[in-house]
Structure formats: C-alpha cells, structure tokens
Amino acid sequence: MVNKLIPFSPPYIDEDVNKEVLESLNSGWITSGPKVKQLEEEVAKLVAIEHAVCVNSWTSGAILVLKWFGIKAGDEVIVPSYTYSATALAVLHCGATPVMVDVNPDFTIDVNLIRKAITSKTKIIMPVDIAGWPCDYDEINQLVKESDVVSMFNSSSGNQKKLGRILVVADAAHSIGATYKGRQSGSLADITIFSFHAVKNITTAEGGAICLNLPPVFSNSEEYKMMKLYSLNGQNKDAFTKSQAGGWKYDILFQGLKVNMPDLCAAVGLAQIRKYNTQLLLDRERVANFYHHKFAEKPYFELPPLQDADRKSCFHLYALRIKGISETQRDLIINEITNAGIAVNVHFIPMPLLTVFKDMGYKISDYPMAYDNYSREISLPIYPQLTTEQLEFIVQSVDKAYRKIVLND
C-alpha cells in the first residue's frame, strides 16, 4: 500500500542536474552566458532546426515574438479557447485582440473554425499542443498560404511585409519531444515556443525557448541575433561579453524587453535535455502506457490520444476524461482522489470561464467542445519517478472515486 502523498508533477532532479548547477555556481557566472548558449544548441539539435532563443518564460517568449512581428492595437491573433491563459494574455500585452475558437475532441484547435475566424485584421494563428499532443500543422500551414487567405492579409510592419501572410506560431509549451508526420515539435510552424516551467518535461525552473523555422525570405541566423538583442533590452552586448576585458562599451539599438534566461536556470535544463530521448521521455511513455492499459478495461473512461498514424505525444499530461459525468461530479471525484493522497489537476479551465475574459465579453456557450473537454477532465500524475506500485494505487483510487460518486458503489 502506498502511504505517502503522490505529488502531481515534481521536477526531475538527479546528480547530473546538481553537477551542472554547482558548476555554474562555482564558475562565478550565473546570469546569461555559456550554459544558456549550450542549452540553445541542445534544443536546436533535438528539434532539428538551426536556432533556438532561450528566454525566462513561455509568456515572455510569446510577447517577444508578437512584438518582433509588429503586433499592436487593432490586430487579431487566433487562439484556441481551451488553453492556459498565457496564450491570450501575451496577445493582450501587445494591445491586440485574442480571437478565440473552439477545439476538437482531441483538445486541438478546430481548423475549420480558424478559417471562419480569419479577417483582414488577423496577423497570427497560435495553435496549442495540449498535453503534448500536436495539432494538425499541415492543415494550418496550408490554410495560411491559400490565395483567398493571403489576399486578406494586411501588413503593417517590416516583418509582416516580408512574410506576406499570416504567421503561424505554435504554443508548444507542452510538446517538446512530440512528433508529427516524423518531424519534431519545434519544426512544425514558422515559430514555436516551448515552456521550461517547473512542471514541464524539461525544466529550467522558469524558462522557455523560441524555435525559429521561418521560410527562406528570412535568415533564421539573423533573426536569432535580433531576438537575442530583443531579450536584452535591445542591447548590442550581453553581460558575459561586457564582462570581458575591454568589453564594457555598449549601445541600446531599440526598445527591447528584459526576458533573458540565466545560466543558473539553463544548467538544470541542460542536464535534463541530454538524457531526454534516452531516459526521461521513455519513462513518461511507460507511465502513459500503464494508464492506457488499465483504464482501457473500464468503459466509462475516455483515454487521451497518445499516438496515431501521424502523431506521437510527448506524454506531458495524462488527460483522462470520464464519460457521461457533470462538472460537479468531476470535482467530487477529484476530492475523493485527493483524499486518497494523490495530487491531480485539471487542464485547463477554458479561458471564457476566467474573470478577465468574461469581463471582455467572451462566453463559454460559444465554445461547447472546450467546455465538454474541461468538465470531464482529470490530469493524473505522469513523471519518470513514478513506480509501478504508485501507478497501481492511482488507477485503483480513480476507479474507486468514480464508483463512489457516480455509481454510489
């Protein structure tokens, strides 16, 4: 019997992480420097692109990208209604309007609804890979290149004129390591943004990475340099360069942001990413497959998508849904599971249910699939440290909670 609390998503900290962090501490250099550069190179290698820019959060990375593309008041960015609030908040921080559309039963944004939402004000489409499950990027990428969609595009910045169409920015906060038609998440859209928050598959405590996969009209190398400047207040030298002998003089080239990642944080992610494909991702898959096998035996559980002919998840979340229950019943089931000593979560409260968006006029009644997914969803613990004994206990506890609340068993 498991008699200890099972946390929802503790960070993976081993001796390799400790070693990298101590090396950073002992080097005397803890802000942006060599370890950030190494992590950027490892991310680019994993994703099979040339350049990734590390930043201090997914949100700051999204704001940077939107500002780089010239997003401002009067512009529209299409986002799914079913995602964490940061997706839309980044748009609001730039003064633009998030245009929410509903999602599919597999949590991904509905491309047919994207098409209906496009106007002459649309500048960006931002699909979200919920739980580590990629969106249908071929459909989205083809949509923005259709002649009638291109003809509606009104450019108002240099980068918009250069691209000449809607930019596709993937919110891949959940999906590092996922694949779509044999390609890695991070290489599926024009720009992809990963999150390295504490609960993510790879963490830097707080952090993120912008992956550049822009078409040939851009130089990804030059845009990498520009975004590095943007992340450091528009300053033409980072602190590491300035610290070198005779390197004190600098200039501010434009009004940038201060969103760079410190070396101390990069050290954590560096140790993890080096063993991601060979250990950490495999362990997450082990946990997901265990759940899949056990819950498939019960007809009242709806299993999350893990793999099909085109896509494979990176198993960031195990988003279990329960058939035929109400939101109230779901909450009561969660209470029972929590009382058993298991920390669970819900991903996500749809944005139209949150006060900031309700006050702006968004209504959950306009997003029935988002509400249906949310009302029946429970995210279960999934991380490398989980043992078979713990997994057995989790499955039994979830089933017991369902039977008590729904079947009065």
Image (cartoon, grey):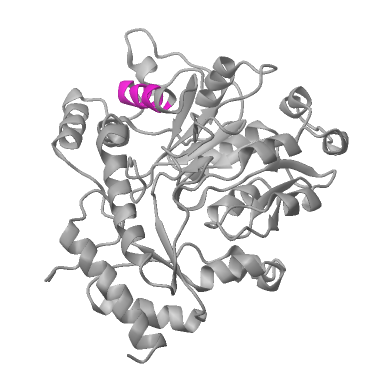
Quarter of the figure with the C terminus: bottom left
Is residue 233 among the parts visible in the rendering?
Answer: no
Q: Is residue 38 above or below residue 304?
A: above
Q: Is residue 143 left or right of residue 12?
A: right
Spot occupied by residue 121 in the image (x, y as percentages of width and height): 81, 44
For image coordinates 34% across by 54% down, the residue present is: 288
Image position, residue 407 (x, y; %): 39, 88
Residue 223, by quadrant, is top right
For the N terminus, the quadrant is: bottom left
Q: Main secondary structure of the magenta part?
A: helix
User: What residue is rendered at 39% in x and 83% in y?
Assistant: 332
Instruction: Please give left or right for residue 330 compared with residue 67 in the image.
Output: left
Kindly identify the residue that appears in the image at 20 percent across and 33 percent down.
21
Give the extent of the magenta segment: 34-43
Q: Residue at x 28, y 68 (%)?
A: 395
Please indicate, yes or no, whether residue 228 appears anywhere in the rendered image: yes
> Which of the pair 65/262 is nearer the observer?
65
In the picture, measured across the screen, residue 70 lies left or right of residue 407, that is right
Residue 153 located within the stretch drawn in magenta: no
